[in-house]
Amino acid sequence: METISLKVGGMSCASCASSIEKEVASLDGVISSSVNFAVETGKFEVQDNNVRDKVIEKIKSLGYSIADDEKVATNVEKIDENFSKFVISIVLAIMIFALAMWPLKGWPSKDVNWYLQLALCVPIWGWVGLKFQKSLLHFLKSGKSNMNTLIGLGTTAAFLYSFFITIFSEYSVQMGLTQKVYFEAVGFIISFVYLGQYFEEKAKRKTTEALNSLFQLSSKNATLITDGELREVKIEDVKVGDVIRVKPGEKFPVDGKIIKGESAIDESMISGEPIPVTKQAGDQLFTGTINGDSVIEYRATKVGNDTFLSQIINFVEQAQNSKPEIQKYADKISSVFTPVVIVFSIVTFLSWFFLGPMPIWGNSVSNFIAVLVIACPCALGLATPTAVVVATGRASLKGLLIGGGDIIEKAIGIDTIIFDKTGTITEGKPSVIEVNIKDSDEAILKEVASIEQFSEHPLSKAIVNYSKEQGIELEEPDSFEIVKGKGLKAEIDESDYLIGNEKLLNENNVFLDNNIMTDQVGSFVFISKNKKHVGSIIVGDKIKDSSKHTIEQLKERGIETWMITGDNEIIAKAVSKELGIDHFIANALPLEKSTKLEELQNSGKTVAMVGDGVNDAPALAKADLSMAMGTGTDVAINASDVTIVKGDLSKALEFIELSEGTMKIIKQNLFLSMVYNTLLIPIAAGVLVIFGGPMMPPVLASVAMALSSISVVSNSLRIKNII
């Protein structure tokens, strides 16, 4: 068994993806078929690679394109194309509408007026709306339909009817055809559909960006040591067992173990923790992590797809390609609605042609077009996009960036939320949280900060920043020395200082004074002055001001809270207890976060994930709803459904409230559009005539269609009042 991955172009809705899945699955040799409309990819499990050509041929025969042998437009190109065509179409449609409303006394005459409308409508129907007409042709050939089919059939019927009575005016009168053109209906229908698709493509854009951000973490080259000589090679040429040299500030190109050197390694992309980890000979290194202040030589243990970063990339890719459980409401409805309307319009035409009164052609064609025009899913197409536009616009003013309606839908029914700690619940950067100096001697803090200013270590920077915030003016030490992995030695104002971890003090026979110790959780920086322990500075990650209130509000709504962090258990327990979080897991690796998330999902929970680092990307991609801090890494933001711009955790709660309100309005919009369509379709078909009532001319059908659109848009505007 083999898996074929293809980039599929030309899909216009979820029913297109469903159609491809079913058709390909019916081929001999195809075991399973899955097509993702959002990311425009297809994954097909086949018995052997010989089936590949059959799969591609079938997809192309259905009217879609494959990136392997045809140019498939990128998402950005399609966004630009949809907007450009919308602008062209709406401008021409407004001009046609102006002519339609123009008084017919004097110039131009009715005939000239109609010819002008025809000239303006041709580029809308034949160029801007070409894909709808192609969908109609495909339907006539295969019998398979989607929303584009109904748009194509409605606009084509209205255009051809209007074209006929414009070009063959006298003959159309003799036939008894209604003397009314519907060019403006063609223009506005196609314009509104393109507007909806423009917003849909914008919402889909970021689903393809997460993997690109992950790939950017990898180095392109590596410096190998061969027979004592250095040579630079491409990352693809590195083999297991090769010895690699990495300078300070460079990324480690592959996974491996240190054989020479000691350095502070920035592993925030793996653990999410901001404080570098000191590593020495025998310790493990991971692709994409960053070397600190010393040259490292290490032996490659994993390369290519076996590296830790590649595992994360593959995990995110699989999660993003998995088919969403909840399909868009409009596509669900259209899968039944479109073929039913087509059949009903044909039945309407035949009923009037064989059973109706004179004029037979006039009544048959007019009612046929009236049904198609009033049923054309303009309001149905606007129901979700307009609500999404209002919701996302409102959200952006509140510091939330939302990808689209499908993401708003994901927030419904969330009963469990998993939080990362660093950068999500906490500030995500080292800062001084407590200073304990014997006799509160401010001179000692000044001297310590003066020494620390010459170190690049994050703990040193935190101490220096704290001192500057206190208004302390720094001096220069008389001597300064970095003790690798332990701290600093220095002399200032005739005093000898040791500043660093407990190991540094122990090696210099300095004993800790329990009277100036504390139970505070954090990284301890011990201070020795003239061989005596005179104080400690505790550096940690401060909890954000909004975290406690947000978690309290979530628990009041009955939502279960979890914190899963790569940090140690002591810190995790302290943070969890302070905030009242229901459950916590410490020392978690990236894939362990996603594994726990899946366990909760398998137990029946609907789980949201809130994080900010690359280590959160697998869980973010797998969650029912993912939210990333805008202050975090690009990959976390791109892999998530929602970006909280300024990292304010309370915005996660606001998004849930906005989603619930928006989904109610989307359902109302769909109901309104369906009420207009289902109730007015029989009237458009002429059912009132049976009871002595009038027929609905297509012009009124187009007005009713416009009113349904106005009602949907007006209802969507109420979203502004939700948050």
Image: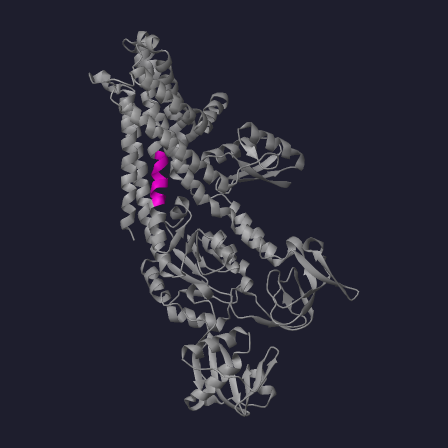
Residue 95 is left or right of residue 106, and the answer is right
Position in image of residue 42 (x %, y %): 55, 39
Residue 75 is left or right of residue 235, and the answer is left
Position in image of residue 225 (x %, y %): 74, 64
Residue 588 is left or right of residue 69, and the answer is left
Q: Is residue 461 above or below residue 598?
A: below
Q: Can residue 488 be seen from the camera position used here?
A: yes
Residue 567 is one of the magenta-drawn residues: no
Q: Residue furthest right?
A: 227
* Number of callouts: 0
Q: Can residue 354 be seen from the camera position used here?
A: no
Residue 385 is one of the magenta-drawn residues: yes
Q: Nearer the viewer, residue 396 or 114?
A: 114
Rendered residue at 51%/75% (across/down): 459
Q: Is residue 239 above or below residue 140?
A: below
Q: Which residues are magenta?
A: 380-389
Position in image of residue 680 (x %, y %): 27, 26
Q: Nearer the viewer, residue 555 or 17?
A: 17
Position in image of residue 418 (x %, y %): 43, 59
